[in-house]
Image (cartoon, coloured by chain):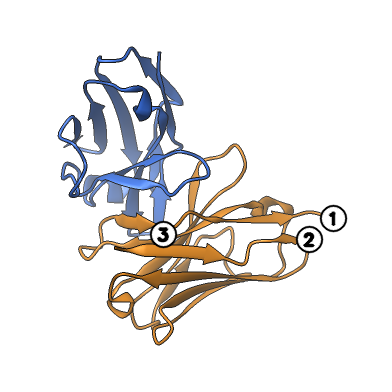
Amino acid sequence: EVQLVESGGDLVQPGGSLRLSCAASGFTFSIYWMHWVRQAPGKGLEWVSLINSLASATSYADSVKGRFTISRDNTKNTLYLQMNNLRAEDTAVYYCARESAGGTSFDYWGQGTLVTVSS
Amino acid sequence: QSVLTQPPSVSAAPGQKVTISCSGSGSSTGINYISWYQHLPGTAPKLLIYDNNKRPSGIPDRISGSRSGTSATLGIIGLQTGDEADYYCAIWDNNLSAWVFGGGTKLTVL
């Protein structure tokens, strides 16, 4: 059974940093592209970042570019999101998601972890 | 840049049918595949439709997807109270090198 379990969400002050983790199991993590998607309170889903299977390519939403860094450790089956210079508008539930083998959808998602940026 | 526009809300009675539209603008929306997701806040979103009209294993055939040009439609027949959720369409934007979600549609089963 495919499982994605996020962790690391917390309350952090504006300008602070946080690292999220997503532990994957039940599939061959190293061959799949992975993503982070977030949902701010009362808002819709917003794509944040992707990383390819070998960690040789990444992409970011304009809203987080230069502040967030996605990475992965295929030996630990874990996806990460390093978030720096956090802003109040980064407050959201952050989900990790697996990109389908065909590359046209997100076929599995985690339950999410809450990041709150507030003083 | 792709923009996907969905109605904020739709509603229908149990047992009835509902459709949710996803209207796209931008060069990618006429080329790339649309996918649809069901989401109850605080839970993991679920893939309902991929490649415009394909259902993953385990998704019942009362849920369907269609595509016409730059627009897509999610259809649900035989509505159940358990279908109450938020529904999102999504597409990969070639120019942005980014995924784009529609704004989401809240389905209420009256």
**Could you tell me if the residues under marks 3 and 1 are in contact, i.e. CB atoms within 8 Å?**
no
| Chain identifier of the residue bearing label 1 in the image | A
**Could you tell me if the residues under marks 1 and 2 are in contact, i.e. CB atoms within 8 Å?**
yes
**Left or right of A51 on screen, residue A12:** right
Q: Which mark is residue A119?
A: 1
What amino acid is found at the position of numbered circle 1 in the picture? Ser
| Chain identifier of the residue bearing label 3 in the image | B
- Seen in the picture, residue A59 relative to B58 is either above or below; the reply is below
Q: Quadrant of residue B9?
A: top left
Residue B80 in view (yes/no): yes
Q: Residues within 10 Å of mark 3 (few under 14, many from 20)?
A: some
| Nearer to the camera, B97 or A85 | A85
| Chain identifier of the residue bearing label 2 in the image | A
Q: Which mark is residue B96?
A: 3
- Farthest residue to the bottom: give it: A75
Name the N-terminal-most of marks 1 and 2: 2
Q: Which mark is residue B4?
A: none
What amino acid is found at the position of numbered circle 3 in the picture? Leu
Q: Residue at horizontal 20%, vertical 63%?
A: A102
Residue B1 in view (yes/no): no
- Seen in the picture, residue B66 relative to A97 is either above or below; the reply is above
| Mark 3, secondary structure of its residue | loop
- Quadrant containing the C terminus of chain A is bottom right
Q: Position of residue B55 (x, y in %)?
A: 18, 44
| Mark 2, secondary structure of its residue | loop
